[in-house]
Amino acid sequence: MARFSVFLALLGWLAAATAQAQTPDVRGTVDGTLGVQQQTQARKDEWAQQAGTLQSRYRTAKADVAYLEARRDYQAGQVQALEARIAEFERRLGEAVRLRNGIGDTLSVILDRLETHVARDLPFLPEERAHRLASLKAELARPDVSSAEKLRRLLEALQVEAGYGGTVEVGEQVIDLDGSP
């Protein structure tokens, strides 16, 4: 038994010596492991924060994309409406040019008919009627006068001539018939 207790004492001393020799290595390993875990946790926290920031930016960007798509669709509708209006204005402009080019001929034809009517009508107020027709003819020949003004003047002359047929005036006048009054 004495040997056994010496053996146990030796074993205890050997274990204590081994423990002392290994303690700095274990502590270093544990400290290193704890340092790695702390670094890992810090990185995880940093990544979690970055992920949150990126998710927030993603949601904002997605909302911006949705807003911009809606805005683009609205603007496309506006562009289509404006293009339709432009096409309508171009059509109207073409029609106006066609009418302007044709109205001069039409006004000339109407003026010729009016002159023919006045020449064939009874001879009353010949100076006034001749002056009106000459003035109207000069007005229609002027390029600086708008087509609308020319039409207005022609319609006015037609209205005056039409008014002669609707009124009756009696006046005394000497007429020469075959050279005798």
Image (spheres, helix red, strand yellow):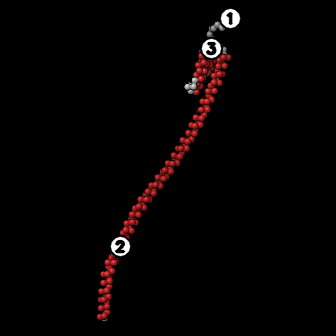
Along the horizontal axis of the image, is 40 left or right of 80? Answer: left
Disc 1 vs disc 3: Cβ atoms closer than 8 Å?
A: no
Q: Nearer the viewer, residue 124 or 103?
A: 103
Question: Which numbered mark, 1 or 2, is in the foreground of this view?
Answer: 2
Along the horizontal axis of the image, is 177 left or right of 21? Answer: right
Question: Looking at the rendered structure, which numbered label has been put on residue 35?
Answer: none
Q: What residue is at 58 percent from the left and 34 percent from the top?
A: 93
Task: Residue 139: give x, y in percent of width and height.
Answer: 58, 22
Task: Residue 99: give x, y in percent of width and height.
Answer: 61, 31
Residue furthest to the top in view is: 180
Disc with the residue nearer the chain's start (1 vs 2): 2
Relative vertical location of residue 5 with respect to residue 171 in this rendering, above or below:
below
Secondary structure of the residue carrying numbered label 1:
loop
Q: Can see residue 153?
A: no
Q: Which residue is mark 3?
A: 126
Q: Which residue is mark 1?
A: 180
Task: Residue 97: give x, y in percent of width and height.
Answer: 59, 32
Disc 3 vs disc 2: Cβ atoms closer than 8 Å?
A: no
Image quadrant containing the N terminus: bottom left
Residue 98 falls in image quadrant:
top right
Q: Which residue is mark 2?
A: 32
Secondary structure of the residue carrying numbered label 3:
helix
Q: What residue is at 31 percent from the left and 86 percent from the top?
A: 14
